[in-house]
């Protein structure tokens, strides 16, 4: 009897141990303990005096630090590191790039469009803002990093030209009342010329359409993410109207041997011109998309290990990840 009880206790102990082993094996590695890049990889620092990754479309490092400068990412660039630090105002800027890191910290990732060129009075119209680009980010944790793909602001319209002032009317000739054939009649003053119309202000340029942001994260702390359409440019101010010219003075009358005559009337002032119209503001650009998916970071590591040399295949795999 006691032997049976002993065997049963031993079996229960073995079963308990197996259950604990299975639970341990089934427990996933915490996301922040997953290194997407081998520990032996190099540590890269980009700053004002050194940029070892200039022009590179693929960077794989143990850590990547961008210190006080903007790293210009070529189109299609991929940055993979266990720790990406953007410090002292550092950031990554480009039309289409991806960042994969266990921890992404600080700074800004920016794929915003450029502002349009302002117009010039009597010359070129303003240009529209350019469209935002595309950013893909996969990280176990994002810590105080702004991620932006806004459309560029439209260029402001130039103001209309001012109307010219009207010319002044000529002064009338004075009368001459001397006798013996020297008598002359006084003349009225001439009317002033009309003022010119002000020109219309240029319409503002359209804002650019915002881009696309895809965030794949294991944690969702507060993040500054923006894919907002660019604001349309301001319309140009209307041109001021020209003032009408002043009427000329009437000729003075006189009294003399030839008789007398009254002074003549002053000329009428010219009418003022009309002001121009203020330019219309440019149309705002359309908003883009920003998508956040909560994914176990181990799935990101597996996707990278399955496509170590093929950036496009890896990014396609990232885009295909969905929450379990």
Image: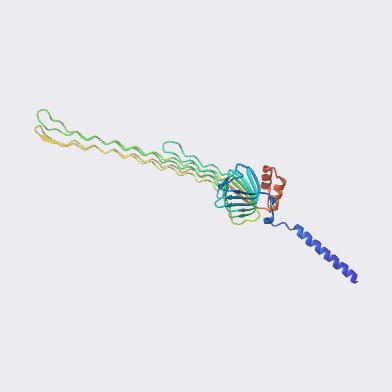
Q: Which quadrant does the N terminus fall into?
A: bottom right
**Can residue 147 be seen from the camera position used here?**
no
Q: Residue furthest bottom?
A: 2
What residue is drawn where x is 85% and y is 66%? 10
Q: Position of residue 259 (x, y in %)?
A: 10, 33
Task: Using residue 189 as the reference point, say whether residue 275 is left or right of it.
Answer: right
What residue is drawn where x is 75% and y is 57%? 26
Quarter of the image for residue 18 reads: bottom right
* Relative to 180, residue 217 above or below: below
* Relative to 199, residue 86 above or below: below
Q: Position of residue 278 (x, y in %)?
A: 41, 42
Q: Residue furthest top?
A: 181
**Can residue 318 be seen from the camera position used here?**
yes
Q: Nearer the viewer, residue 35 or 137?
A: 35
Q: Residue furthest front?
A: 49
Task: Using residue 195 as the reference point, say whether residue 86 is left or right of it.
Answer: right
Task: Using residue 260 as the reference point, say whether residue 211 is left or right of it.
Answer: right
Q: Nearer the viewer, residue 211 or 107?
A: 107
Q: Nearer the viewer, residue 222 or 55?
A: 55
Q: Position of residue 16 (x, y in %)?
A: 81, 64
């Amino acid at each position: 009897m006691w032997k049976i009880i002993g065997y049963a206790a031993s079996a229960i102990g073995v079963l308990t141990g197996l259950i604990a082993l299975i639970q341990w094996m089934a427990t996933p590695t915490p996301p922040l303990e997953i290194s997407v890049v081998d520990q032996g990889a190099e540590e890269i620092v980009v700053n004002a005096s050194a940029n070892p990754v200039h022009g590179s479309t693929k960077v794989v490092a143990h850590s990547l630090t961008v210190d006080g400068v903007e790293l210009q990412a070529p189109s299609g660039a991929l940055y993979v590191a266990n720790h990406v630090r953007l410090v002292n105002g550092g950031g990554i800027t480009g039309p289409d790039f991806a960042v994969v890191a266990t921890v992404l910290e600080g700074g800004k990732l920016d794929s915003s469009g450029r502002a349009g060129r302002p117009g010039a009075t009597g010359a070129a119209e303003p240009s529209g803002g350019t469209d935002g680009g595309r950013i893909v980010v996969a990280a176990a944790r994002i810590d105080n990093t702004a991620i932006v793909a806004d459309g560029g602001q439209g260029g402001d319209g130039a103001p209309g030209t001012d109307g010219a002032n009207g010319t002044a009317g000529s002064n009338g000739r004075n009368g001459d009342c001397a006798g013996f054939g020297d008598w002359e009649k006084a003349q009225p003053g001439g009317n002033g010329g009309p003022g010119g119309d002000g020109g219309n202000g240029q319409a503002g340029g359209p804002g650019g359409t915002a881009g696309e942001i895809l965030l794949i994260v294991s944690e969702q702390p507060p993040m500054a993410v923006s894919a907002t359409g660019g604001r349309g440019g301001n319309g140009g101010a209307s041109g001021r109207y020209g003032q009408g010219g002043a009427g000329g003075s009437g000729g003075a009358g006189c009294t003399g041997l030839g008789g007398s005559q009254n002074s003549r009337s002053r000329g009428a002032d010219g009418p003022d011109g009309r002001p121009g119209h203020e330019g219309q503001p440019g149309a705002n650009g359309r908003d883009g998309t920003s998508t956040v998916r909560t994914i176990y970071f181990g799935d990101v590591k597996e996707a990278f290990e399955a496509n170590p040399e093929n950036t496009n295949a890896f990014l396609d795999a990232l885009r295909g990840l969905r929450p379990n």
